[in-house]
Image (spheres, helix red, strand yellow):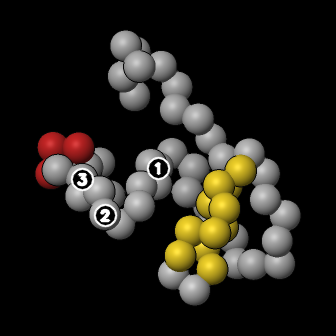
Amino acid sequence: MDPGIGDLPQGDVLNEDGTIAAVECEITAGAEVLDMTGRIVVPGFAPVPPWGRGPC
């Protein structure tokens, strides 16, 4: 995204009952998988300004 920052880390986020339960490189859990490739995932408390949003 920004050459000055470099690549963002990739990993898995486990959500249990609306709460982030784990963030790891790879999570193996019997859960629904949402492919978020190419997107940035942030906790709900961090609003993303309009200029930081992609076209989707």
What is the x, y in percent for residue 21?
Answer: 63, 69
Name which residue type carries label 3. Val
Name the secondary structure under disc 2: loop
* Quadrant showing the C terminus: bottom left
Q: 27 above or below 10? A: below
Name which residue type carries label 2. Phe
Where residue 48 is drawn, which disc sits there? Answer: 3
- Of the numbered discs 3 and 1, the one sitting upstream in the chain is 1
Name the secondary structure under disc 1: loop
Q: Nearer the viewer, residue 5 or 24?
A: 24
Residue pointed to by mark 2 = 45
Q: 36 above or below 16? A: above
Crowd tier of the residue under label 1, counting other residues whose Cα lies within 10 Å: few below 14, some 14–19, many 20 or above: few
Residue pointed to by mark 1 = 39
Name the secondary structure under disc 3: loop
**Residue at 46% across, 54% down:** 41
